Image: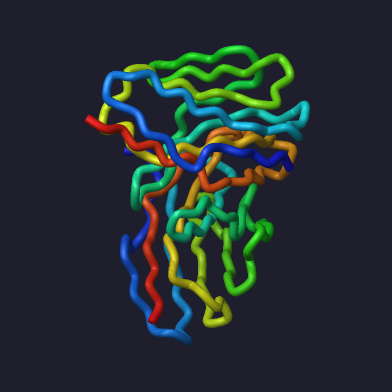
Amino acid sequence: LAKTTQPISMDSYEGQEVNITCSHNNIATNDYITWYQQFPSQGPRFIIQGYKTKVTNEVASLFIPADRKSSTLSLPRVSLSDTAVYYCLVGAADSNYQLIWGAGTKLIIKP
Amino acid sequence: DGGITQSPKYLFRKEGQNVTLSCEQNLNHDAMYWYRQDPGQGLRLIYYSQIVNDFQKGDIAEGYSVSREKKESFPLTVTSAQKNPTAFYLCATADEGGYEQYFGPGTRLTVT
């Protein structure tokens, strides 16, 4: 199972774009990259998922280079409510649905 | 209203007692999971089930037990054999493919 490495914490300001990078050097061919957001005392919430290149939805973009050894979650124009822990996961259904959750990146948005 | 229900939200028990945490879903998902989260840490997989009447141990199954008699329900029992049971417990489901997991609100268990 692939492991991921993320920064422990990041700070930014309201209105800025925030990029969180995740390293996954041992990603397997079948693995997808998924990002979740978690607020205190709540379950994680799915943000975005991708396999290669770029994926965009209404809340974020995910950039994946050709070698897929890293990925970057981009949050445009953050607000105070984006203060949360962000997890990067890699995994595939054929790994018996097992995903390895790291400690995530604690993002603090300041006014 | 589709979703995952975990009850209760807070649970207090004395050491030596078994306790069962409830997880119910109406998303019609086959796969269900139980995770444990300690302060400042990521999630650790306790048990998972891909289908009714079948379940597999995760990374930290010792001291826990589960059952999957119905598709909708995946209760977790924290036994007295679990040395450090105080934690935040999260139940999740996944649709076909298992790429996206949906989480319940969690149960915070405190054992004293």
Q: How many marks?
A: 0
Give the camera-side residue of B101 and A24: A24
What residue is rendered at 64% in x and 58% in y? B53
Q: Quarter of the image holding residue A70? A: top right
Give the camera-side residue of B67 and A22: A22
| Rendering coords of residue B3 (x, y %) | 38, 42
Give the camera-side residue of B110 and B73: B110
| Rendering coords of residue B26 (x, y %) | 43, 44
Q: Which residue sits furthest left?
A: A111
Q: Is residue A67 visible?
A: yes
Give the camera-side residue of A83 and B45: A83
Q: Quick check: A39 above or below A81?
A: below
Work out which quarter of the rendered image holds the C terminus of chain B and state it: bottom left
Q: Quarter of the image holding residue A44? A: top left
Q: Is residue B28 visible?
A: no
| Rendering coords of residue A77 (x, y %) | 32, 18
Q: Quarter of the image holding residue B22? A: bottom left
As drawn, is A57 to the left or to the right of A22?
left
| Rendering coords of residue A38 (x, y %) | 40, 42
User: How was this image coloured?
Assistant: rainbow
Q: Quick check: B69 above or below A75?
A: below
What residue is rendered at 53% in x and 55% in y? B35
Work out which quarter of the rendered image holds the N terminus of chain B and state it: top left
What residue is rendered at 61% in x and 29% in y? A33
Q: Which residue sits furthest bottom?
A: B16
